[in-house]
Amino acid sequence: MPADRDSKNRDGGTPITAPGVGTRSRRRLSGVVLVALALMGVSTVVSATTPTVNTIRGDIASDDALVVFYDYSSAANAVWTTQAEFSAGTIIDLDATTQPNSLVLAFGGGGSTAPWWNPSWTGRTCYSIDHTAAGASSVTEYPLRVRIDTASLIAAGEMQPDGDDLRAIASDASTLLPIWLEGPINDSATSIWVQVDAIPAGGTTSFCVYWGNPTAGSASDAEAVFSYSSFKPLYYAVSDRYDTVGADIYVVSLVDGNRATNGIRTSGNLNAGRSYRFRARDNSSTTVISARGPLATRGDGDGFDALVPISFAGTQFVYPTERLTQTISMYAPFVTATVNVYNGTTPVAGSPFTIPVGTPVTVTADVTGSRTGIVESNVPILLTYVTSSGGDAYAVPPVSSDDLYGIRSRDAMLGMVASTSGTIQFSDGTTQAFGGTRGSRLTSTNNGGTSGGGPGDGMRIIADQPLGAIQQRDLDGYESTHFTPESELGNDYYLPTDADYIAIVCPQPGTVVRLDRPGGGDVNVTCAGPPGGPGWVTDSSGWPDRTRIYSLGGEPFHVYYEDANDQDETNLHSLKQGRQYTWPEPVVTPGGGGYVPIGTWESPTYDTGGSGVYGTISWLGSLPASSSIRFQVATDNVDPPALFVGPDGTPITWFTSTPTELAFIHDGDRYLRVRAELATTDPAVTPQLDEIVVGTNLIPFNHMVGAADTITVSGTAGSTSRHYLARVKTTAPLLAGSTATLELTSALGLPNISLADVSLGASLQVSIVGGVIMQSIGPPLGFDAASHHSVILDEQMTGPGLGATLDLRWQANVAGLGSPLVEHDLEVVILP
């Protein structure tokens, strides 16, 4: 970037003149030089008034100019600076609309083309949401989980160590979306939940997660992510026992501002910990509890368990148990399903089954021997399991590839849907390897007894294939609860009914769990276990309904309780199980979401209207750290010019500084195009290009014979500015093999100049530092038709309001002549 706009004006703007600056007479050329010129065939016509394009000392005019000094400030500028001008070019991965009248990099990855939400946040990842699958339904306030490598971001200093700077922004680049940092933070796959405001059926949308503000406070709010402004179908009865036996359904809200309805009765406002009962007469296997937020649920009676959350909808399930007469009830919430049920690998009678949408189907599905029951559907369904042995029942989650957590009390049973091997870790530090084939069952027995078993009964199951597991048979010998996949563990639960005991297993030993009675008498219990987990704890003090069970540090854990009325072990479900679910599901694709790494723009052809001399290319814009802008130009007498080159006239170089002169090979070409390349290595930042100027059709200085050409520039104080003063060319054969130098002829001492470097192209000729002349004449520089060059000034003034004048003498020498063949004076006036 130039330090001031004068550097641009010098390269093609209106020339700046200095009023009152006069000219100075020059010495006449010696007789030796005159003879030399005559011998070389150069005209020596004397004229005191004829304007020329160069001055040969001695007031000599030439019919064919030996040297031409072109005025950079005389350029007819080709300019691109408006949105229309940028948009008229060819744009690849750039955007001319996000910042009007500018070019910036486009956004890529994650389907987001939204502008950056807030510059105080320096990083983001965006996610595209595709909801175009056939049969998709529009949804609002839809929770989605994404995973981010926060460990790398924190290590690089790009994110707060606690993740408090995380924000979620909708596709409009302005709407804040509810976000919950589930954790763990500083992990390669931190779980983050975002509630997307709207996902249209048959369409796509996007959102972005931002970070990188070191002063931002936390916006993480689990309740906000799983709370809704309208009723959402969240929990399903499914079990046929609601038709044959009947039961009240108790619900307790897990969030404030909740309400619940079964379509017949509707609760009042339910804050967290408030309960409501749906009477048995209003419930059936088709009952759906819709709510404005998550609930703890239970059918009150023997053989009833938690309702089935819609988040349990899946296509592959196991029920790894053999208990007298076994039935499963299946419910298709979206479309009619075709379901196969297996006893091990043998289909049960009647399989496959057709499950009409919205109509539960119950089938007898006994399992024999050491097999597991398998249920496989072509579309997502919900499933409950009931056996005649003690009314054993539970809501069945789909099989999972996650590690499973649960409690062996007395038995734990694993069901496999494929050849599987794995390891079980127990809370006493022991381990057990296991393996099996499709349809097989593994039973891990401890006979730990009542109240959740013994200290070695906390379990973590690690397997190489998806599976399912249950707990079965505490001291009274009947009921079952499912193990929970790690990704589904919660950290905050409520009891919907009274409990004899509460059993807990924690991935992190040492997790402190608080049990809050509605009427007081709270206690803390700690999960005990080996390093690396799992931890285990039970409490059999007896706890009333609406007791809150939560970890003080926010750590996740699995919990079940034994109902005090019918001794059924019952799963508790957390906020996450109270999320919406729709099918077909929206497809979420993570992407960079930031600016694309590189983009290009090519201008339309600019017609110079002639075959003039080209000046400099300059630009205005901004370059944040990690970004770059560079240019190439193409010229030709054929439209469009196609060969883009850099400052040395080859395609392998680029213009990167501003201003920079164009290669002399362009001179004489009529048509011009410019290519700009914008790039970044940081997806959070983009360079911004506001203006491109190329000087064309430069004209020679209009000086009198024997007079200096006066060039005026605006000086700067405190920063260095570059000025292109004159473009010097020759086509004279007699100057082949000549050299050129530039000499400072000013009086000693230039106190107003902090810095002045005058160069011929890349060769430093004159140097002034702190007003002191460090170098008054430079080394000879090759000068001929193939070695054209420019006179360039880099200056910095001592202070505001101070100007200076530099008197320079350009000389061309031919070996053997003994004195300069051509001399010309340039007077550079630096205005304050």
Image (cartoon, grey):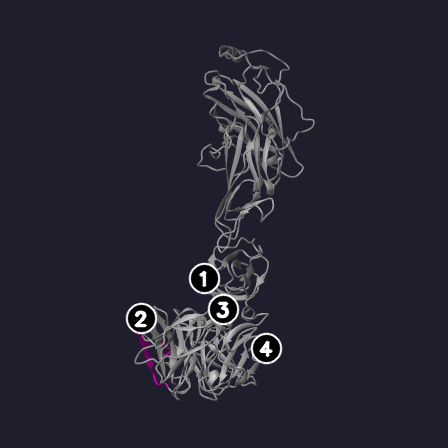
Helix, strand or loop at label 2? It is: strand
Q: Secondary structure at mark 3?
A: loop
Does the rendering let one see residue 680?
A: yes
Relative image position of residue 625 (x, y in whole percent)? 52, 49
Quadrant for residue 659, please give it.
top right
Instruction: Look at the numbered discs 4 and 1 and tell me whether their residues touch, using CB distance below 8 Å.
Output: no
The numbered mark at residue 271 is 4
- The numbered mark, 1 or 2, whose residue comes first in the sequence reads 1
Q: Residues within 10 Å of mark 3 (few under 14, many from 20)?
A: many
| Alpha carbon distance from label 3 to label 4 | 23 Å
- Residue kind at label 3, given as amino acid type: Tyr
**Between 308 and 761, which is closer to the camera in this rendering?**
308
Q: Earlier in the sequence, mark 4 or mark 2?
A: 4
Q: Mark 1 sits on what residue?
A: 151
- Mark 3 or 4 closer to N-term? 4
Q: Is residue 83 above or below residue 229?
A: above
Please tell me whether residue 443 belongs to the stretch shown in magenta.
Answer: yes
| Residue mark closest to the camera, 3 vs 4 | 3
Figure check: 395 above or below 184: below
**Element type at mark 1:** helix
Residue 581 numbered mark, or none: 3
Looking at the image, do the residues carrying marks 3 and 4 touch, with CB atoms under 8 Å apart? Answer: no
Measure the C-alpha gap from mark 2 to mark 3.
Answer: 31 Å
Q: Is residue 449 left or right of residue 263?
A: left
Task: Provide the residue span drawn in magenta.
Answer: 425-448
Indicate the amino acid at tag 2.
Ser
Quadrant in which the C terminus appears: top right
Is residue 530 among the parts visible in the rendering? no
Which residue is drawn at the image coordinates 51% and 69% (left, top)?
Answer: 580
- Which label was assigned to residue 421? 2
Task: Looking at the image, tell me whether mark 2 or mark 3 is earlier in sequence order.
Answer: 2
**The disc labelled 1 sits on which kind of residue?**
Ala
